[in-house]
Image (cartoon, rainbow, N blue to C red):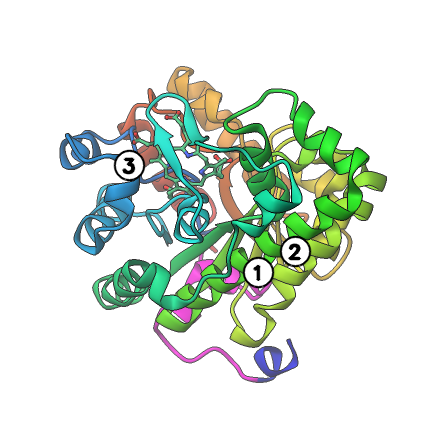
Amino acid sequence: GAARDASPAPDGGPADSPFVRACRREPVPHTPVWFMRQAGRSLPEYRELRAGVPMLESCRRPDLVTEITLQPVRRHGVDAAILFSDIVVPVAAAGIDLDIVPGTGPVVAEPIRSAADVERLRPITVDDVSYVDEAVRSLVVELGDTPLIGFAGAPFTLASYLVEGGPSRTHARTKALMYGEPELWHALCARLADIAGEFLRVQARAGVSAVQLFDSWAGTLSEADYRRYVLPHSLAVLEGLADAGIPRIHFGVGTAELLGVLGEAGADVVGVDWRTPLDAATVRIGPGKAVQGNLDPCVLFAPWPAVEKEVRRVLAEGLAAPGHVFNLGHGVLPETDPEVLTRVVELIHQASAR
Ligand code: CP3
């Protein structure tokens, strides 16, 4: 917003970090890098800490959240931390009975398919997610000059889990509800937008330096349907963050046709997957927005010379954008060798040094 642009970033501190500067399209000493799913199963120290603790329980323990969030920062020297949590955490806090099943993902006990079901989704306040407030405050102290990224799931991706009852390849039930009962669809998404928006504001008030809205499965929609059924709700989430004065990243997978409208939804930075080169993405997104991405996570399984070649290509294509945050095009796969991630961070910092 205007207030943010008017006040120069203070010297030092996370607001003056390469990551936040790149999000704001300001000059940077090197291209900043972090990885979606950097905190998680690719790290042996994560698996050790999580042994015997269910996923949702670990998200509700500030001591574990703090430690797991810090692990990839210590190990890889990434330019930003991302809060350890999950997109379904605020939905569970809103009263929906769900679990995160290892190897599967979120599973909802009673899927949402009727008006009465939508009523079960009540608004949340900070008291419903006090463990997130507490974890962010402790992380901001621990991280010092390293920025912390907060996040939420966008209404479409959350709705998909709630309507399907779990992960889905086609999102068939979700789309049937969207096309067949548009009023119910919009009522569901409006409630999810409220919940996601409040979850992000809790994190912003506790001190995160940026937020990312994950609409992982939005790429399954045409642009016209995205505009009609999804855009108003994601816009409400991101507009509700405008006053916080922190960069907003908007991400989805398979969104080549949606890059422009993902930016229109109120993003400062648009996440791009590996299918669209960053220079082409920059044209599609239009002026005034930074990009984030877009190394294929599978490249990390190739021999180092191939990894290096791909990293250098992404860096070169990123120069076309007014700001570039290096990332993968989607999350780190659990089988990834963490030493390769560390080496990628070193390469990016060294090859992009201005
Ligand atoms: O490091 C980070 O990125 C921060 C933590 C984070 C998690 N989930 C932890 C997690 C973030 C940002 C998410 C977001 C998330 N969760 C998304 C959007 C990002 C994306 O990947 O598209 C989605 C779609 C979910 C839903 C979800 N939760 C899935 C699909 C899974 C994987 C299921 C599996 O086991 O393969 C989860 C579980 C989950 N969330 C894990 C972690 C570390 C694995 C749980 C474990 O360690 O057992």
Magenta extent: 7-31
* Amino acid beneath label 2: Ala
Question: Between 233 and 33, which is closer to the camera in this rendering?
Answer: 233
Question: Between 30 and 214, which is closer to the camera in this rendering?
Answer: 214
* Residue for badge 3: 55
* Amino acid beneath label 1: Asp
Horizontal relation, residue 212 to residue 236: left or right: left
Dominant SS in magenta: loop
Q: Identify which residue is drawn at 29% across, 28% down.
A: 42
In the rendered image, residue 311, in percent from the top left (x then y), is placed at 49, 32
Q: Which mark is residue 190?
A: 2
Cα separation between marks 3 and 1: 24 Å
Q: Is residue 40 above or below residue 288?
A: above
Q: Residue furthest right?
A: 224
Q: Identify which residue is drawn at 74% across, 29% down.
A: 176
Q: Is residue 3 above or below residue 335?
A: below
Quarter containing ligand 1? top left
Q: Nearer the viewer, mark 3 or mark 2?
A: 2
Q: Are marks 3 and 1 in contact (CB under 8 Å)?
A: no
- Judged from the image, the secondary structure of the residue bearing numbered disc 3 is helix
Classify residue 243 by image quadrant: bottom right
The quadrant the N terminus occupies is bottom right
* Residue for badge 1: 194
In the rendered image, residue 116, in percent from the top left (x then y), is placed at 61, 45
Q: Are marks 1 and 2 in contact (CB under 8 Å)?
A: yes
Residue 316: tell me if it is visible: no
Is residue 27 within the magenta segment? yes
* Amino acid beneath label 3: Met
Residue 352: tell me if it is visible: yes
Horizontal relation, residue 271 to residue 94: left or right: right
Classify residue 182 by image quadrant: top right
Q: Is mark 3 within 8 Å of ligand 1?
A: yes
